[in-house]
Image: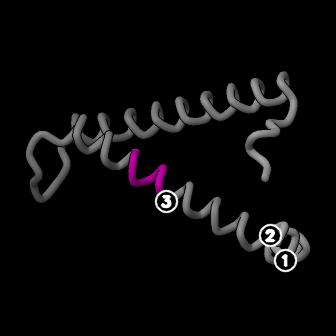
C-alpha cells in the first residue's frame, strides 16, 4: 500500500490535524505547569501569596513568549530552506 488512502479523505486529514493541535497544546500546558511550579512554588498552602502569584504570572508569560519566539524562528527557517522533503512520506 502506498499510504494514499489517508490523504484522500480531507475530512480525516482535518480531524487528524485538529487532534494533533490539541495534543500539542496539552503537552505545552503540562510542560509550562511543571516548569512554573518548580520555579515558583516553595511550599504549597491554602492560598498563594502575592510573590508566588506574580512569579507564576511572569513565568507563564515568559514561557508563552519563548514558545512563540521559537515557533516563529522555526517557521522562518523552514520558509528560507523550503519544504523539508525528509518530513513527508
Left or right: 65 in relation to 89: left
Specify whether 13 is left or right of 59. right
**Mark 1 in CB contact with mark 3 (< 8 angstroms):** no
Left/right placement of residue 50 relative to residue 7 reads left
Q: Mark 2 or mark 3: which comes first in sequence? A: 2
- Helix, strand or loop under label 1: helix
Tell me, yes or no, whether the highlighted magenta stretch contains residue 47: no
Residue farthest front in this picture? 1
Residue matched to label 3: 26
Q: Position of residue 64 (x, y in %)?
A: 52, 38
Indicate which disc, 1 or 3, sits on the residue closer to the N terminus: 1
SS assignment for the magenta stretch, majority: helix
Rendered image coloring scheme: one colour
Where disc 2 sits, the SS reads helix
- Label 1 environment density (alpha carbons within 10 Å; few <14, some 14–19, many ≥20): few
* Between 46 and 18, the one nearer to me in the picture: 18
Residue positioned 88% across, 76% down in the render: 9
User: Could you tell me how far apart the alpha carbons at marks 1 and 3 are, in whole angstroms?
Assistant: 23 Å
Q: Which residue is mark 1?
A: 11
CA separation in Å, label 2 and label 3: 18 Å
Mark 2 nearby-residue class (10 Å; few <14, some 14–19, many ≥20)? few
Q: Quadrant of residue 69?
A: top right
Q: Quadrant of the N terminus?
A: bottom right
Is disc 2 in contact with disc 1, using a CB cutoff of under 8 Å? yes
Q: Give the percent coordinates (x, y) of residue 63.
A: 46, 35
Question: What is the quadrant of residue 58 in the picture?
Answer: top left
Residue 64's disc number: none
Residue at 56% x, 55% y: name it: 24
Q: Picture coordinates of residue 21 (x, y %)?
A: 64, 59
Q: Which mark is residue 14?
A: 2
Write the start and end of the magenta stretch as one range.
27-31
Amino acid at each position: 500500500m502506498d499510504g494514499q488512502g489517508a490523504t484522500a479523505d480531507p475530512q480525516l486529514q482535518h480531524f487528524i490535524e485538529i487532534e494533533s493541535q490539541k495534543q500539542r497544546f496539552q503537552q505545552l500546558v503540562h510542560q509550562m505547569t511543571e516548569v512554573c511550579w518548580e520555579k515558583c512554588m516553595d511550599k504549597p498552602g491554602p492560598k498563594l501569596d502575592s510573590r508566588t502569584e506574580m512569579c507564576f504570572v511572569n513565568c507563564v508569560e515568559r514561557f508563552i513568549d519563548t514558545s512563540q519566539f521559537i515557533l516563529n524562528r522555526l517557521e522562518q527557517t523552514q520558509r528560507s530552506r523550503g519544504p523539508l522533503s525528509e518530513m513527508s512520506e
